[in-house]
Amino acid sequence: MELGFCCPVCGGTLERREHAAVCGNGHSFDIARQGYLHLLPPNKMHSKLPGDSREMVEARRRFLEAGYYRPFRDKLCELAKRYAGGGATPQRELEEDKPGSRNPEETSGLFQTEAGAGIGERAFSSHSAEAGVKILDAGCGEGYYTEAVRKALGTAEVYGFDISKLAMKAAAGKYKEIGFAVASSFAIPVPDGFCGCLINVFAPMAEEEFRRVVRPGGVMILAVPGERHLYGMKEILYQEPYENEHRETEYSGFSFVSRTAVREEIWVPDAGTAMDLFAMTPYYWKTGVDGGKRLRETRGFSTEIAFDFLVYRRTER
């Protein structure tokens, strides 16, 4: 079976053989028990386990699945459907995400403005009869947004990659309809013009590679933090909290289409949730000991959350 990803060494087509993906030149890559491919060559790994640690992956999954960033997820899906197309969402999957479909304890206390196997044929096949546009989630983490977009678009082929092996293990273990791989945004193992829609949520911007892999006429959807994203948490972490810089950025080979702002206020109820959120952010790496101590001692706080979604269209050149 031909796989969507290609050989990171020679660029050749990969085919599945038992528990490995092999190209025509004999380069072979493991397919993990959970179903993801490991396509990050050893000479591109700058540490034994690059990317997010197990603790960070678990913290991200707990926080996201509790629903705090649900407005961002929903807007991303709306934009992906608008600009990338795709089929209708299966009714059963819609029902799973309706308010009240989960345990009330899982959704209470979030928004202050509202109530509370292995690799599959579909996951890596590039020949699905019903397949529409290909979606590629760059730096997809544990797959929360990737899976939401897959559900929203219905018949699209969806792929995601991340430099963290532990993130891919978590993603592939849960979301069996998506093709996942350990890979870098700066050497994406897919052919030129591979996807009609590339998604990047707070992941590194690799302009040249993104231009290469998005086909002409396709779209790139970037999520960037708004000016006051997590300002309430910053007030605890820092003596002098600061707003994020607002940027208008042009990218060669892309034309700007739209900017969509999503703003909400959330209540972070306890120190455990606060530390999960903290572990998802760059502040985790650059905050002093005193700031981290104050956050661990919090009894809850309110904070703004703010994403800006930037949509770009791939030009012919």
Image: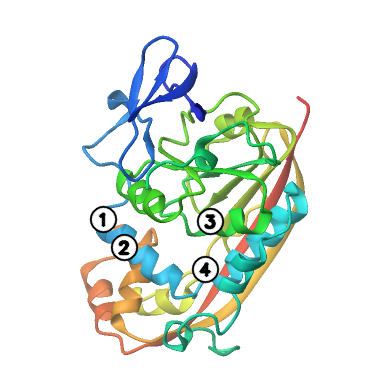
Q: Amino acid at mark 1?
A: Arg
The crowding category of the residue bearing disc 4, from other C-alpha atoms within 10 Å (few below 14, some 14 to 19, many at least 20), is few
Tell whether 152 sits left or right of 10. right
**Separation of disc 1 and disc 4 at Cα?**
30 Å
Tell whether 76 sits left or right of 35. right
Question: Picture coordinates of residue 311 (x, y %)?
Answer: 70, 50
Residue beneath disc 1: 54
Secondary element under disc 1, as helix, strand or loop, is helix
**Separation of disc 4 and disc 2 at Cα?**
28 Å
Residue depicted at x 57% and y 69%: 306
Q: Does the rendering let one see residue 209?
A: yes
| Callout 2–callout 1 Cβ contact below 8 Å | yes
**Separation of disc 3 and disc 4 at Cα?**
31 Å
Question: Picture coordinates of residue 297 (x, y %)?
Answer: 24, 84
Residue beneath disc 3: 147
Q: Nearer the viewer, residue 254 or 11?
A: 11
**Separation of disc 3 and disc 2 at Cα?**
17 Å
Q: Nearer the viewer, residue 301 or 54?
A: 54
Residue beneath disc 2: 58
Secondary element under disc 2, as helix, strand or loop, is helix
The crowding category of the residue bearing disc 1, from other C-alpha atoms within 10 Å (few below 14, some 14 to 19, many at least 20), is some
Decide: is 167 above or below 136.
below
Residue beneath disc 4: 243
Mark positioned earlier in the residue sequence (1 or 4): 1
Q: Nearer the viewer, mark 3 or mark 2?
A: 3
Mark positioned earlier in the residue sequence (3 or 4): 3
Residue depicted at x 38% and y 62%: 280
Q: Amino acid at mark 4?
A: Glu
